[in-house]
Structures are given as C-alpha cells and as structure tokens.
Image: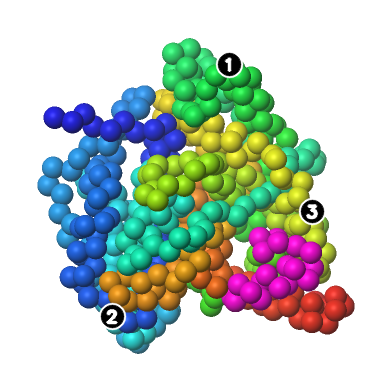
Amino acid sequence: MKAPERMSAVDRAWLLMERPTNPMVVMGLLVLSAPLPHAALRHILAERFLSFERFRCIPVLEALGGHWERAEQFNLDDHLLQVALPAPGGKRELELLVSELASTPLNTGRPLWSFHHVQRYQGGSALVVRIHHCYADGIALMGVLLQLADAVQDGAGLSPVAGSPPPTPPGPEAPGVRRTGSLTELLGQALREGSNLLEKSLHYTLHPIEGAGATREVAGLAAEVANIGVLLADDPVTCLKQPLTGVRRVAWAEPLALEEVRTVGRVLGCTVNDVLVATLAGALGRYLETRGDRTAGLTIRAATPVNLRTVQSARPELGNRFGLVFVNLPVGIRHPLERLYSVHQAMQTLKGSPQALATFGLLSIIGSLPAAVEEPAIALFSAKASLAASNLRGPAQYLTLAGVPVTQLLFWVPQTGSIGTGVSMFTYGEEVQFGVIADRRLIPDPAELVALIQAEFDRLVLLVLLGGGSLAD
C-alpha cells in the first residue's frame, strides 16, 4: 500500500492559519457565455481535476507535521453542486451567492474543495470554485484551470505581478496603540523548541537551496525576517482594522481594457502594475474618508503574494511556493499623478528585495513547529498590513470549457489572521478586473469600493487626456 504523501511545511502553515472568522480558502469565479451542461462539467472534473491525486485527499495535521490521506468514501457529487439564483438572476444575486459561500466553511470530513455550478446566469452560467489554500497557491491553481480548459494555449503567461517598497523606519508610536512582539522574539521561541525541529524547518526553508552557502543564506533570510518585524511599524488603525465577524461580502468591477491601462502607464512612464496599485490606493483613500477616517498623509500596507517558482512545467505542481511582500499604499495622496509616481518609486526601490523569500522562510518555520508558535507569528504579520492584495496575470488567450467560452475570470486569495479585506487585480485575455472580498464589519458593501476604483481609474485617464493638468477633488 502506498504511503501517504507528506505535507510540506508551508502547506501545513496555511492549514494551521484556518480560523472560524477567516477561512484560508482560495475563491474563484468563472462566468460563461452560454449554459454549461452539468454532465460535461462532471466529466471534465472526473477526468482532469481528479487526475491530481491530492484533490482526492484530506489534509491531516500531526503534532509536528502532516500528511495527505486519501478519502475512503470519496464521491465527486459531494463536491460538485448545482445551484440556482433567485430572480432576476443577475450580477447582484451572484455576488450574494459568492458572499454566502465565502462565509461558509468547507466540510473538514472531506477533501477541502467544492465547485458550485450556477445555471441560467445572464443567459449563460457560472462556476464558483473554493479550494483550501493548503492544497495549492494561486499560480498552481491557475495551472489546474488551464488543464480543465478545452485547449491550453502556449504563452498563456501565468505570473504574478507584485511589488512593494523596502522596510522603512517606523514613525512615533500612536498613543494607546500596543505594538506586537518582534519576529526576532518569535524566532528565539522557535529556537527554544529544540534544535531538531529547527533543523527540520530550515530544510523546508532552504529547499531547493543546497551547498556550502546554505548557512549564509539562512542567516541572511533570518535577518530579513527580523527586519520585517522590527522596522515595519504596525499599520495605522482605520475602519479596516476591527475584529472580524466571519460574514463576508464580495463584489467585482466591470473589466477595464488592458490596452487602456497599458497606454496610461506608457504615457506616464509607469507599469501596468503601478497604475493598478495607484488606482486601488486612491479608491481606498476615498472609501476610508466616507467611513470617517482621516487620510491626510496616511499610508497603509497590503500583504501581496510573490511567486517564487523558477520553472513552470506544462503540468502544474500543487503546493505553495510564494512569499509575501508589504506594499505601501499612499491612500493620503489625493492627486492621481502624485500618487502614481509615489507608487512607481516605491516599486522601483523594491526590486531585488529579499522580503518574499524571507516570509516564505518564516512560513516554513511556522509549518514545522508546534501550533502554539504559529499564533503570535500570524498576529504580528496581521499587524503590519490592512489588507491582502493580489495582482495575477491570467491566461492571455480566452478559454473555453466543454466548448463554452469563459468570458470572465476572477480569483480572491485568503487573508491571514486579523486581516479581513482582500482585493484581486486579475488580467484575463485583454481585460483587467478588480474584485473585493471583505468582512462585513470592515466593508459592509464592497460594491461601494468597487465603484470608487472605477472612478479613480477614470480620473487618471482624464488627467492624461488633459495633459497632466490638475483635477478638482
């Protein structure tokens, strides 16, 4: 009998992060232009999705590790469900369904994933996909999606676009705000758990780094991890920093033309990523003001995933291979151009930063030690950011599923610890789409933020057309 597959330390860390108020689930939405036959979808999942053995397995935690255990009574129909939207069956009704599913835990007695097949949506159909983060990260899951599609186009170009400025010295601590402990202390606690456990965790941290320089690499990563904890001040308290309810709300914008975003960036000497991040920062600033927060001179951070894979094979390798960087969002800068160039400079400064590899190393350590060590580490990381933001470049070619065109494609990554807001910037074909997911206490109606994102991009386009002149607030 084949021995169960061992769980990597990083995958175990994402399983340990699961909270009743903050599930670690990757959410996906596919909108199709015509009805998708349920039998055809079931056949695709049985033949292609379940060809990945892990999706037949349940993650099992152990004291200092974990493994993937094949479900004895696996039934695909437990994971593939047909649902109908209430009348009139439009976008608002679909957003409410996705919100409900985002607030509903996966069944831990089964493999942690589900597909909800929505029939008769705007003359077509939709798929809501939920997969626990411990199975794979967004890059790997995009690869899985390509395996499900009718044809995989060469040069689909799946890679994340992310960046952030380097750590800067913290400003004066606000009165009455308690700082969390430093990561240096957490690493010290990890060391005290025993040299054998540290040795195991370092194995995961280093992989695939080998050779005589390994010790120096570990020392450098440990120093960077400590810098994140010491040099990055806790993010300022705003309406995005409140206890979570576990009830989530979801909304998404109408797609932006990728060529229009490219043109704006080209004219202003910035990247597509710069334009998207600056647009998000402007929208967040305006939203915070509507909720009564003072934003003058305010900067908040987004925890952003960065892919650490060096080679992408035709068949995706499941698991998590990414680090996190902390992106400064200058929400207090009102003028679109000034804000854009602030973001651009920060992104330029970031190049070459070891933050992503350092946070990957920390996740490896967390996933190799007793669960008690994980809680304070996640609390510390949560204090450094106000939201999670992912910028993923999806397939450059439009996909079809069982012959039905996929017209829209969105993904939301989970937020960790006490972070309860996530923003997705996803490029598919020749369009870019923003999606927002948030705890209802933080953003009761994400559609309001989505509308501000569109308005901020329109302001930037108008400013370009006016030749860089000022815009009234």
What span is in magenta?
Answer: 256-274
Circles 2 and 1: CB distance less than 8 Å? no
- Alpha carbon of mark 1 to alpha carbon of mark 3: how far? 36 Å
Residue occupying the point 48% across, 12% down: 195
Type of amino acid under label 3: Gln
Res. 154 image quadrant:
bottom left
Question: Which residue corresponds to mark 1?
Answer: 212
Position of 122 relative to 127 (above/below): below
- What label sits on residue 256 in the rendered view? none
- What label sits on residue 345 in the rendered view? 3
Number of callouts: 3
Provide the secondary structure element on which disc 2 rests: loop
Residue 362 lies, in percent from the top left, at 54, 31
Circles 3 and 2: CB distance less than 8 Å? no
Residue 159 lies, in percent from the top left, at 54, 54
Residue 261 within the segment the image draws in magenta: yes
- What label sits on residue 35 in the rendered view? 2
Residue 123 lies, in percent from the top left, at 34, 86
Q: Residues within 10 Å of mark 3 (few under 14, many from 20)?
A: some
Type of amino acid under label 2: Pro
Of label 2 and label 1, which has the lower sequence position? 2
Position of 30 relative to 392 (above/below): below
Of label 1 and label 3, which has the lower sequence position? 1
| Quadrant (top left/top right/bottom left/bottom right) for the C terminus | bottom right
Provide the secondary structure element on which disc 1 rests: loop
Front tag of 1 and 3: 1
Residue occupying the point 39% across, 73% down: 406
Type of amino acid under label 1: Ala
- Alpha carbon of mark 3 to alpha carbon of mark 2: how far? 46 Å
| Quadrant (top left/top right/bottom left/bottom right) for the N terminus | top left
